[in-house]
Image (cartoon, rainbow, N blue to C red):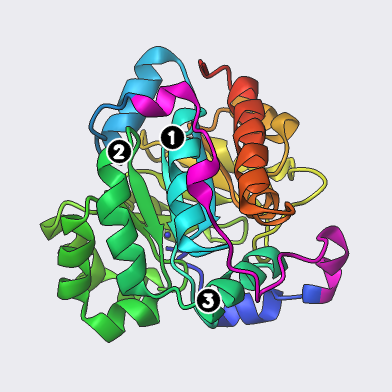
Amino acid sequence: MAVVLKATWFSQSLKKGSEDHLFPRLHNPQRLAVPSRSFKLPMAALSTTPAVGISQTFTRLRKQGKVALIPYITAGYPDLATTAEALKVLDSCGANIIELGVPYSDPLADGPVIQAASTHALAGGTNFHAVLSMLKEVIPQLSCPIALFSYYNPILKRGIDKFMTTVREVGVHGLIVPDIPLEESEILRKEAAKNDIELVLLTTPTTPPDRMKAIVEASEGFVYLVSSVGVTGARASVSNNVQALLQLIREVTSKPVAVGFGISKPEHVKQVAGWGADGVIVGSAMVKVLGGAKSPEEGLKDLENFTKSLASALHVNVL
């Protein structure tokens, strides 16, 4: 996901205390639940067509005059069985692309909700191999593409070429790596292209214009516009600067632009879509809804309702 946001930038921006009051306590890390099979998926989930790539998805939506809904959830939160069901719920309730976070022990770009979800997932035994095994079973049942959100160290640990080959084999279409600078992304971009993985890069409100142009040029699938300086997390409102930033990006590219960080309500997605975004990314709010319920089954039902409310705000047809 160029900027790409440097670890030092995140360290300076990470002010946990300023956001902690926004989020209630999450699931008890010891409760790994989950007879998710008792949750009944919406009828749309019973009939899917093979997913196409991210770029193709945006092309189709543009022709239809629609804006992409891009939810994010953390793999393994509250457990992998629930993650598998959540992917199907999101797919059937209006999501056009799904961002799936690979839990990591030092998630510098993420706020307290996603940090807590990652900690919980890792404590429950979720690892990269387990995530891929789950995706191998679930992706054939989905009609929208999956983009993995992974920090750079886990990719390096496995070897960039091996990582790309492995994720492509299970059907992943996109990759977002928030902590790799543009200057260090050449090998990653080459291996991604070789394996038909669309590597999405990020630009922020503080990115200089020349650098933003370079990021936009290198990004595949779409350009990820970070709406505000800081870490992920729900916010009361979306910065009005987003509209101007979208206009600046439009001046240098025709690639799709999706806005993320801090978007958490139907009125937010409607506002951002009205400013001209091609996609709207909702992360912490999704994680909070899924993990904040009394049980995984209730969380999945809450996720269904919340996703439908966001899709409705974007005028997506939902059964």
- Which residue in the rendered view is the most extreme toward the bottom? 157
Callout 2–callout 1 Cβ contact below 8 Å:
yes
**Where does the image place residue 65, in percent across and percent down from the top left?**
45, 15
Q: Residues within 10 Å of mark 1 (few under 14, many from 20)?
A: many
Q: Secondary structure at mark 2?
A: helix
**Where does the image place residue 150, in percent across and percent down from the top left?**
41, 68
Cα separation between marks 3 and 1: 25 Å
Residue, disc 2: 141
Q: Earlier in the sequence, mark 3 or mark 1?
A: 1
Asked if 40 appears above or below 213 in the picture, the reply is above
**Where does the image place residue 1, in percent across and percent down from the top left?**
42, 59
Residue, disc 3: 124
Q: Earlier in the sequence, mark 2 or mark 1?
A: 1
Q: Residues within 10 Å of mark 3 (few under 14, many from 20)?
A: some
Q: Hey, what amino acid is under mark 2?
A: Gln
Q: Hey, what amino acid is under mark 1?
A: Asp
Residue, disc 1: 91
Q: Is residue 81 magenta?
A: no
Q: Residues in magenta?
A: 17-46
Image check: 267 left or right of 305?
right
In depth, the one of 240 and 258 nearer the eye is 258
